Amino acid sequence: MIITTALANEIVARAMAIIHHNVNVIDHHGQIIASGERHRIGEQHEIAREVIRTGKRICINNAVEAAPFQNVHPGINHPIIYDDRVVMVVGISGDPAAISRYAELAVLTAELLVRQAVEMRETNWRQRLRDTLFGQYLDQGASPAGQEALHRLVELGFDFDTPLVPVVVTVQVEQHQLSEILSTLLREFSQLAGIRDVILLGSNEILILTLSESQETLLRGIEFVLSNQISHYHIGIGVQADSAPDIREAIRFARSVIEVGSKVQPQRQTYYFREMAMLCLFRVLEDSYMVNFFINNVRQLLEHDSGEVLLDTLSSFIANNAEPGKTSLLLGIHRNTLTYRLQQIKKHIQLDPMVFTDLTQLAVSVHCYRRQNPRQSEWIDSLS
């Protein structure tokens, strides 16, 4: 184990707050890396090197005993041992006879902080390993590599059988702040009630696996944590799942609703897949081999002299949930005129806007066409 400067400084600060004597922390090479006497930092400590070699405490009782050695003052030099080797030496300055009682407190402080640091590193290592394996499972799925990652996750104690709702959080953070803010978000998310696991999927993506109860209260807590740290973020809520394949699929839902929702309703920051599943389906259709079929429905309509008018009428009809009264009011036309135009659409492309299945196909057609030929629309709002 390598003692960091941050840990060494913490040991010095805490020990000196207790014993009110100077404390030095010397690394396993014999160099002072933290001290209440800051001018000594960076110096080699000759007695500490002997402590490291022997693994035993050495006391220097007075200035006469200290004189033959380089950078050594009277005091107690005690080894801190981990995994059967000296990882550092704690030096307490003063007359050993007078400070022995205080020295034990300083040594105890150092040992506790070292043990805490080791446990934290092991916990962080297990957490990062789990995050990596979870990301591999999401990417690889049923492939041998994906199943191997899933097997290792189960070995680490990850429970896929409890009903969970995945919440995906994407953040936009300046690079120089990224590490600090992510650490804070991960810590504070994990402390919220109702959260089973918090997993870092990437430098801008966090997965929160929540229990299904108290969903609204929990989401308010997540939003509160985010708003206290950053201003640019999005939250995607998937659907409940209770098996590894279902959780993987539900996470895809949560990711897709962020992709679509951030473009359809950019004024919002939280999106539910159940509310926007149809728009997510439209997004999938854009990459389908069928997309040209749907686009051709609109192109066929536009071949007629009144095609643009009919397309605008159809778009408004869809936007107003196929309600003739609202649509005619929005367009400023008589209801009979609306009925005539809808009949013209049926005549030209053999799809009846008054029939649900035909209207669904027409809605997909208008969406796919507008993606290639953008135009402001209340119901699409340009998904590009």
Image: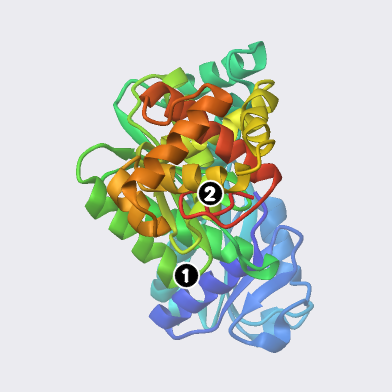
**Residue 180, above or below 36:** above
Question: As drawn, is 130 to the left or to the right of 328?
Answer: right
Q: Can residue 197 be seen in this view?
A: no
Q: Position of residue 369 (x, y in %)?
A: 64, 39
The colour scheme used to paint the residues is: rainbow
Q: Name the residue under label 1.
A: 229
Q: Mark 2 points at which residue?
A: 312
Which dot, 1 or 2, sits closer to the camera?
2
**Residue 283, above or below 40:** above
Name the amino acid, label 2.
Asp
Q: Which residue is drawn at 37% across and 50% down?
A: 190
Q: Residue at x 47, y 56 (%)?
A: 265
Relative depth, front residue between 265 and 374: 374
Name the amino acid, label 1.
Gln
Crowd rating for badge 2 (residues with CA inside 10 Å; few <14, some 14–19, many 20+)? some
Q: Which mark is residue 27?
A: none
Q: Residue at x 45, y 24 (%)?
A: 358
